[in-house]
Image: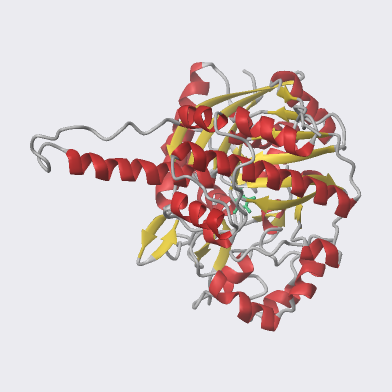
Amino acid sequence: MTADLFVGIDIGASSGRVIVGRVGTGAVELDVVHRFPNGVVELEGALHWDFDGLFAEVLAGLGKAAERTAARGATIASIGIDTWAVDYGLVDDDGKLAGQPFSYRDGRGATQVARVHELIDPQRMYQATGLQHLPFNTIYQLAAETYLAGRQALLIPDLLAFRLTGTRRTESTNASTTALLGAVAGEWAIEFLRALNLPADLFPPLVEPGETIGTLLPDIAVHTGLPGETKVVAVGSHDTASAVAAVPAADRNFAYISSGTWSLVGVELDAPVLTEASRLANFTNERGVDGTIRYLRNVGGLWLLSESMRTWAQEHQVMNDARSPAAQPGLPVPAPAVLSLQELLAAAGGEPAGGPLIDVDAEEFIAPGNMPARIIAAASATGGALASRPAAVVRCIMDSLAGAYARTVREASALSGQAVDVIHIVGGGSQNTLLCQLTANATGLPVVAGPVEATALGNILIQGRAAGAAPATLTALRAMVAASHPGVRYEPELRLTTV
Ligand code: LFR
């Protein structure tokens, strides 16, 4: 029997997966046993997550993991969970969930910003929590709640862990995205809970990555086929914390870009930067694994691309319906095919450099909707004429992202004093060769791309370490990632200019 298998549950804003990870001597391997889609759903006019649907997928994935490992005569040592940050579900004394959790893409947080800032001065909030201002931070969402009596707030990974084990905990890397956790002490900022009239025990007690949350509830063990003693272990439950833990950097002089729905761009530090300059530049000090600080900014991400592709697919459907033989007898010509991601990126690579740019961080890009129209309007507002053909829009997104990455890396380094010699891109964007090359060009630094599954690797490695199957330091864990998942290196291309 081997006991070096771990299950990672890793759910992002657009998809989730259940992974069986094997931690061996100097190497870590993943086997994705279950994938499922995720996305916001509209319920009673507001944007939510289908938590019950996600939990059903988690159970299905755990069942597959149990089957897969039993077939190999192996056992699963533990389960770790990570998801996006900020959002939570409200649970009553009996453990019942009060409705499906709101999504951060719903606008309700933004409506509370002014009121919260009247109660807590934003400068004081930053000095205490070190969190960047995002209109959907947990603190603003909580301010929109009308009924909290007898309820506790469980962040999404904590809610999943609670459903699996019956134990209520708040994992600390994710707690740091609430704007209710002190950046230096890592304790709840009780004064802010009080200022907002929120109960002091609104969140369950904190737990650090590597600590055990509990073991499976009997009915979960029966349902999934996993042994009842299977542990749920806290990992960097904020997906970005897990991703940064698995960046295959050799030393501290690196910047990372965790590139997925969002691009999280920054450096790793030992202590937070809480200066006024840092606040004005909107850098965040989120907690990382092993007490590190993820000093970063949320830059717009591949959400701009995926929402654009969704819009084009919808328009294509409408055109096709209009051209169907039923709608237009005698004109049964299908609309031109929608380009795949690969085709779109290839076409975008062929578009001329130096085209119009947009501010990828603008609030108007947060909500779902017709992204190409918003991008074209944003480009024209800054004097650029952006053609509506998909290749031109995609090129504009890529150029704008690369430019924002370069600015953000420069600022993170300047504000923190952390030198940067190389940029690691991990997550989905690491497979986007155009984006990786444009980033190397814009920063003038080498880019090492990969692994694409950094988040899942970070999740598995922290469990592996807790079980004694992986080394103690982050540097040694990262060396395991580098050895088993070699990256692709992009050097900055020289731009020849005529004088
Ligand atoms: C990335 C991420 C970001 C967070 C955003 C919203 O998946 O977790 O770090 O700011 O989603 O939760």
Q: In this view, does 254 lie above or below 381?
A: above
Q: Nearer the viewer, residue 200 or 255?
A: 255
- Residue 137, given in percent of the width and then of the height, sits at 62, 64
- What residue is shown at x 42% (from left), y 36% (from top)? 60
Can residue 24 be spotted in the picture? no
Q: Nearer the viewer, residue 150 or 138?
A: 138
Q: Is residue 35 above or below residue 88?
A: above
Q: In this view, does 218 lie above or below 2?
A: below
Q: In this view, does 323 lie to the left or right of 218?
A: left
- Residue 197, given in percent of the width and then of the height, sits at 63, 81
Location of the C terminus by quadrant is top right
Q: In this view, does 448 lie to the left or right of 308?
A: right
- What residue is shown at x 23% (from left), y 39% (from top)? 320
Name which quarter of the figure residue 359 lies in. bottom right
Q: In this view, does 256 lie above or below 152?
A: above
Q: Nearer the viewer, residue 257 or 88?
A: 257
